[in-house]
Image (spheres, rainbow, N blue to C red):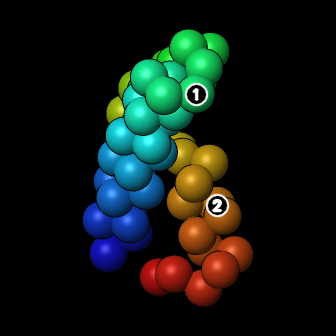
C-alpha cells in the first residue's frame, strides 16, 4: 500500500513540476531532477523520505 502512495505522489510531483517548468519558469525542472534522484536513491538504499512522512500521517 505504501509503495502505491509513493509512486502516485512521485508521479504527480514530476508531472506538476514539468508543467510549472513549461508554463512558469524553467528552474522548476530542478524539482523534477530532485524527485528523480530520490527515486533512484531509494532503489539502492530501500529508504524513502516520503515514506517517513506518510508513516507519520498514519499510512500503513
Residue 11 pos. (x, y %): 34, 46
Residue 15 appearing in the image = yes
Viewer-side residue, 8 vs 40:
8
Count of marks overlaid on the render: 2
Nearer-N-terminus badge (1/2): 1
Element type where label 2 sits in the image:
helix
Residue 19 picture quarter: top left
Q: Residues within 10 Å of mark 1 (few under 14, many from 20)?
A: few
Q: 33 above or below 46?
A: above
Disc assigned to residue 59: none
Residue placed at 65% from the left, 80% from the top?
57
State which mark lies toward you, 1 or 2: 1
Element type where label 1 sits in the image:
loop
Left or right of 43 on screen, residue 33: right
Residue placed at 66% from the left, 64% from the top?
53
Residue 34 appearing in the image = no
Q: Quadrant of the N terminus?
A: bottom left
What residue does disc 2 label? 52
Whether pointer 1 and pointer 2 mark residues with C-beta atoms closer than 8 Å, the reply is no
Residue placed at 56% from the left, 14% from the top?
26
Residue 6 pos. (x, y %): 41, 57
Residue placed at 30% from the left, 65% from the top?
4
Q: Residues within 10 Å of mark 2 (few under 14, many from 20)?
A: few
Residue 16 pos. (x, y %): 45, 43
Residue 3 pos. (x, y %): 34, 61
Q: Residue furthest top?
A: 26
Disc assigned to residue 24: 1
Q: 25 above or below 45?
A: above
Viewer-side residue, 42 vs 31:
31
Viewer-side residue, 19 vs 57:
19
CA–CA distance between discs 1 and 2? 30 Å
Q: 7 above or below 37?
A: below
Amino acid at each position: 500500500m505504501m509503495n502505491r502512495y509513493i509512486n502516485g505522489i512521485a508521479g504527480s510531483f514530476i508531472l506538476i513540476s514539468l508543467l510549472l517548468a513549461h508554463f512558469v519558469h524553467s528552474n522548476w525542472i530542478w524539482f523534477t531532477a530532485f524527485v528523480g534522484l530520490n527515486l533512484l536513491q531509494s532503489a539502492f538504499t530501500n529508504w524513502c523520505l516520503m515514506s517517513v512522512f506518510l508513516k507519520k500521517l498514519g499510512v500503513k
